[in-house]
Image (cartoon, helix red, strand yellow):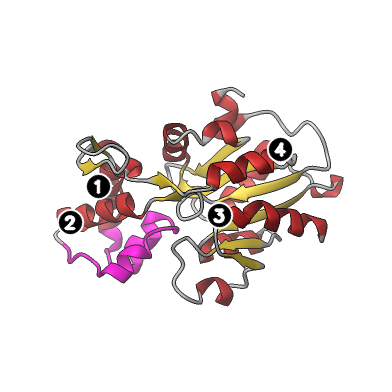
Amino acid sequence: MNTIVKQGSGPHMAQHPRNVVLLDLDGTLTKSDGGIIASVIKTFEELGRPVPDDAELHRFIGPAIIESLRRNHVPEEELDRAVIIYRSYYADRAVFDDPNEPGNKVPGRLVNVVFPGIREQLLKLRADGYYLALASCKPEYQCVPICEHFHLTELLDGIYGASKDNSRLDKDQVIRYCFDKIGFDASAGDKAVMIGDRYTDIDGAHACGLDTIGCRWGYAPAGEMEEHGVYEIIEKPEQIEEAVNRYFQTH
């Protein structure tokens, strides 16, 4: 499949009904906390603002960056600059240690590893005939090189993320954008389920009339997924295929 398709502008799905598995990126497919947190710390330091505590830093993983900056009292007039600083460290500035290649310096987005078992599960889901679509609140222009770097691109049917200009920011907006691009048609029997680790995945899926299978290995604080009405929680990546099959067999 060519790169154009991977970037979310591919042809409509060729056949219906189709079962679609929507996959979050951070905390679901990849362990990305190191690069996100390091970039957030650099951002607050550059803004001259107190760095949030460890628990709060971990809450940056999942929601759109601008949402987390607001929650940490960055004033509206500083938000645009803060996002630019964050994205420069996360996407461009090779100042962090590479966990996959000691001694190498990389931008924040590559301070990241794929959770053990994820690739095998994606291969199994593809073999089962599911359409696999990444649906992330991370900007799409960042999702694509991350997936390429970690060899996830060839295991996915499409990569869909937020827009650079914040017009497509929340998970429900990303899901609707994905559905539009792939020609998702519930009236023709298409069905979907979200797999993710944070309230943003659950709330975004609910807004689109979907359920979420929650990932305990991700970044949700204790009780968050339950409070937001997650359909089911699985404990480890090796349970993904089984949970997806069980979901579609009963819906």
Cα distance between the residues tagged 3 and 1: 33 Å
Cα distance between the residues tagged 2 and 4: 48 Å
Residue 14 seen from this side: yes
Q: Closer to the N terminus: mark 2 or mark 4?
A: 2
Q: Closer to the N terminus: mark 3 or mark 1?
A: 1
- Secondary structure found at label 3: helix
Q: Closer to the N terminus: mark 4 or mark 1?
A: 1
Q: Quadrant of the N terminus?
A: top right
Q: Which residue is mark 4?
A: 127
Cα distance between the residues tagged 2 and 1: 9 Å
Residue 172 seen from this side: no
Magenta range: 49-77
Q: Which residue is mark 3?
A: 237
Kind of residue sitting beneath label 2 = Leu
Q: Closer to the N terminus: mark 2 or mark 1?
A: 2
Closer to the camera in the image, 73 or 102: 102
Kind of residue sitting beneath label 3 = Pro
Label 4, residues with CA under 10 Å away: few <14, some 14-19, many ≥20: few
Q: Quadrant of the C terminus?
A: bottom right
Q: Residue at x 59, y 60 (%)?
A: 204
Q: Closer to the N terminus: mark 2 or mark 3?
A: 2
Q: Is residue 212 left or right of residue 113?
A: right
Q: Which residue is mark 2?
A: 47
> Nearer the observer, disc 4 or disc 1?
4
The reply to whether the C-beta atoms of the residues labelled 2 and 1 are less than 8 Å apart is: yes
Q: Closer to the N terminus: mark 4 or mark 3?
A: 4
Kind of residue sitting beneath label 1 = Ile
Determine whether 57 is above or below 148 in the image. below
- Secondary structure found at label 4: helix
Name the disc covering residue 155, or none.
none
Label 1, residues with CA under 10 Å away: few <14, some 14-19, many ≥20: some
Using the rendered view, name the quadrant where residue 110 is placed: top left
